[in-house]
Every structure is written in structure tokens, then in C-alpha cells.
Amino acid sequence: MRVVFFGTPEMAVPTLRALAADAALRPLAVFTQPAARRSRRGEPEGSPVAAAARELGLELHETASVNEDGPLARLAELAPEVIVVVAFGQMLKKAVLGLPRHGCINFHPSLLPLYRGAAPVQRAVMDGVIESGVTVMRLVRKMDAGPILAQQPWRMDPQLDAGQLLEQAAQISARLVPETLRRLETLTPLPQDDARATFAPPLEKHEGALDFAADAASLCNRVRATQPWPRAWCVARGQRLIVHKALPEESPGDAAPGTIVRLDQTGMAVACGRGAAVLQVVQREGKPPLAARDAANGLRLAVGDVLAPGALAPGA
């Protein structure tokens, strides 16, 4: 099968490698986003997909828009039967969508039509979803609304954060996408029920701000959902305190939200609107992540001290 691959971040790399390892599905070319700065002071770097494509010896195109004349002309020359899209980061116009005989096939880490959009895993984690799934669909002009080619259940382990779950989804994609391509001629696409659709817009920086007035389970889900970006934070002694890991627990006390109610080897237990959040791994600005008890010692925090909401952090 004549395959072209569209993808950009690390999540897309396992699928690219799986396709490249299959002689029948090895991509004719790879299209990805152009090089960009990964830090304020760093030089522009190619995407993870670009690096993998070079390593695999695949034809590579780094372009800000695959819909423009140059990339589109090259696509037409390649005459793909199918375009595989995994976390590409560009909207595809009609000229691209209609080019391959089998269309553009996309992996999406949710049970569509639930969580359409750019952040399905993060939004599901924030909502406390555990029993979820993944979808391979054919792309259409409407976002994540195309007919479904394959789906499978996926348990989103509540011990994992969004970054870890995205890594897990990438491995599922590497198995499910090639399998779907091999069965493409025999599959019957199933239309989505738009009435059941929910949406998952990209996270915004302010969504990492923690508010201990929330219930503990919701607060800890926010910590998980905002890894690796924008990360969750609160304020301790006037400093931003980034929270990498936290677990909820029942709290029989009536301490005000934000109050440290326990400090021991399990972490820093902080009273919430309901229950308590046990902060386990935290990080002061400019410092490495530490066990919460060690960070508390460095900040001279004690039981009874109060952590302020993240919205009050400097630069929040």
C-alpha cells in the first residue's frame, strides 16, 4: 500500500516506526511541522518525528502547511493510497483529504465521539475518567467527526498522569494503526453520533493553578491532567510550588482548605474542600523535584501552615 505519514510529537513516533518496519506499509514520505525552539534560549530543533524519519531513511518534508502549493504538489506526485495522521498539528483542507483513495486515517486517544479535540487524554483525566478507549477514524473537514474504522477499550490507570498515558496511547497506536491499514479494504466505516459528542480543547496555562477549596479527588486529577504541561502549582511562603504528584485521601478533620494537616514519609497532606490531597512530589521554581517532605523542610513548612491557591502565584 502506498502510505504517507503526517505527525509531529513524540507520541507519533512509535506508529511511524511500526509502519517503517513493515515492508507493505513503509511510508513513501513523512510530513511534519517545521523546526521550532523547545526553550527560550535554545536553537530551533526538528520535531521528534523529523528525527525518527531521518534515522529511518525516509523522505522528509518539514512544512508549516501541508495545504500549500509546494507540499501539496509533492503529495500529488507521491500518489498515496492512504495518509496516516497521528498528532500532526495542522488542519487538513479538502485538497489533501480527498487525495488518497482511502482518505486520511487518524488515531485519536478517546472513544469518539467523546473528547473530540486537541487534548482528549488531559481532559478525560481532569474529569476523572478511567474506562476509556481509542479510535482510528477517517478524517473529514469537521474536527474529529469522521467515520470510525476501529475502536478498542483502554483503561486509563488512575496512578498515571496525562504524559504517561499519552506514552501508553502511542504504543497502542503503533499496534492498532498498522492492523487497521491491513484490514482497510474489508472495513465498514461507522458514522459518529454527533449528539453524543463532547469536546477537549487544548489546556491553557491558568488551568494548572490549584484551588484547595475543590474536593481532593478533583484537585489530584488536575495535577495528573496538567503533566507535563502546564503543570499544577500552588503557593508556599510566597513562592510558586509546582506539584508533580498528589493522591487524594479521606480527611476526618475540619481544617480550612490549604492547611497542612500532616507531614510524614507519605507526603504533605493538605486539607481540601472535601478530603485531603497528599502532595508527594513537588518542585520550587528553579530547583529539582523533591519528595514533598524534603521540600517542606527546605521551606520550613509545618503542620498548620497554609498553602495559597495557585492563582496567587507570581506570574500566574
Image (cartoon, rainbow, N blue to C red):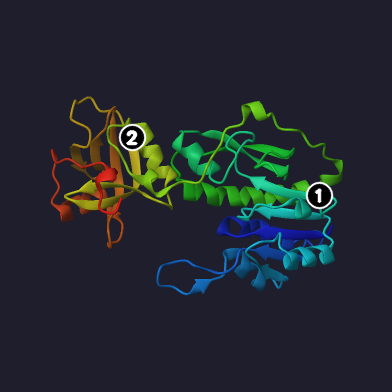
Q: Quadrant of residue 35?
A: bottom right
Q: Nearer the viewer, residue 314 or 298?
A: 314
Percent of width and height locating residue 185? 86, 45
Q: Residues within 10 Å of mark 1 (few under 14, many from 20)?
A: few
Please give the name of the residue rendered at 69% of the width and 70% of the height, measured from the top-left corner. Answer: 60
Residue 172 sits above or below residue 78 on the image? above
Can residue 157 be seen here? The reply is no
Mark 2 nearby-residue class (10 Å; few <14, some 14–19, many ≥20): many
Count of numbered badges drawn on the protein: 2
Pick the residue in front: 111 or 35. Answer: 35
Task: In this rendered view, identify the residue nearer to me: 229 or 296.
Answer: 229
Q: Which mark is residue 25?
A: none
Badge number at residue 248:
2
- Looking at marks 1 and 2 on the same chain, the residue that comes earlier in the sequence is marked by 1
Secondary structure of residue under mark 1: helix
Residue located beneath label 1 in the image: 182
What residue lies at 27% left-to-right and 59% top-to-bottom? 285
Q: What amino acid type is highlighted by mark number 1?
A: Arg
At 45% from the left edge and 37% from the top edge, which residue is drawn? 126
- Residue 284 is situated, as x and y percent measured from the top left of the image, at 26, 56
Q: Position of residue 54 (x, y in %)?
A: 65, 73
Q: In the image, is 80 to the left or to the right of 205?
A: right
Calculate the distance from the C-alpha at mark 1 to the C-alpha at mark 2. Answer: 44 Å
- Helix, strand or loop status at disc 2: strand
Q: Is residue 58 left or right of residue 265?
A: right
Q: Amino acid at mark 2?
A: Pro
